[in-house]
Amino acid sequence: GGIITQTPKFLIGQEGQKLTLKCQQNFNHDTMYWYRQDSGKGLRLIYYSITENDLQKGDLSEGYDASREKKSSFSLTVTSAQKNEMAVFLCASSPGTANTGQLYFGEGSKLTVL
Amino acid sequence: QQQVRQSPQSLTVWEGETAILNCSYENSAFDYFPWYQQFPGEGPALLISILSVSNKKEDGRFTIFFNKREKKLSLHIADSQPGDSATYFCAANYGNEKITFGAGTKLTIKP
C-alpha cells in the first residue's frame, strides 16, 4: 500500500502572508489534487495535476498557486492569507482516469489565519 | 451553483436501523458517482461507487440506488452500527480527472 503525507498538519499564519503546503505520495500515481474543506461546504477543488509539471485549475483556484515539480509531490501556496480564514486543505492522488480509479486522501492540513 | 447536492445535512438513526442519505446532481453528463466516508481528523476514503449504466450497487451493508432520469441517487446503510458514524460525501465526474463533491451528510448512529 501507499500513503499520502501532508506537511505541515497545522499551519498558523498572519493576514497577507504567503503560506505553502506540501504533499507527497508514494503510490506512483499520475494525478494529484488539492481540495479545500470548509464546514458545511464539502470539498472544493483548488488545483489538480495529471502529470509532472502539469497544472489544471479547479473551481476555487483564485488566491492560490500550485506546483508539481515531481511526480510524487504537489505543493499549494496560499498567495495572501485572509484574516480569520480557517479551513482544512486535503491533498489526494489517483492512478489515472478518475472514473475508474479512486482518490486517496491525506489527513489534511489545517490552516488558521490570525 | 452547487452541482452536487446532498440531504439531509445531518442525520441521526438508531443502531440497527437503515440510514438513507440522498444526493442529486445537475450535470447530466456525470457518469461516475463515488461515495466517500470521512471520520474526524482523517481524509475521506472511498466507500462505494456506481457508474450511470447501473441502477443499483451493493457492497455488504452499503447500497447505492441510482435514478438517471431524475438525476438522483441515495446511499442506504443497513443495520447501522455506531462505527458508521461519520460524514458521507457524494461525488460525481464525467470521464476526466475533475471530481465534484457535495457538501456532505453527517451521520450519527445512536446505540
Image (cartoon, rainbow, N blue to C red):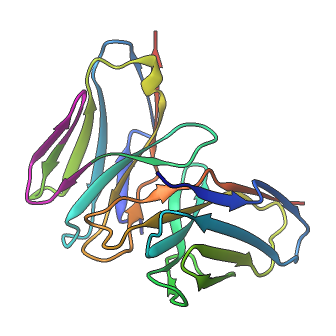
In reply to whether residue B83 is colored magenta, the answer given is no
- Nearest the camera: B53 or A83? B53
Q: Position of residue A10 (x, y in %)?
A: 79, 54
Q: Position of residue B69 (x, y in %)?
A: 9, 58
On screen, A98 above or below B65?
A: below
- Is A110 situated left or right of A27 in this image? right
At 35% from the left edge and 65% from the top edge, which residue is drawn? B3
On screen, A73 above or below A111?
A: below
- Nearest the camera: A68 or A111? A68
Q: Position of residue A59 (x, y in %)?
A: 50, 76
On screen, B30 above or below A71?
A: above
Quarter of the image where the N terminus of chain B is located: bottom left
Q: Quadrant of residue B57?
A: top left
At 27% from the left edge and 39% from the top edge, which residue is drawn? B75
In reply to whether residue B55 is colored magenta, the answer given is yes
- Is B55 situated left or right of B44 in this image? left
Magenta segment boundaries in residue numbering: B49-64
At 32% from the left edge and 12% from the top edge, which residue is drawn? B16
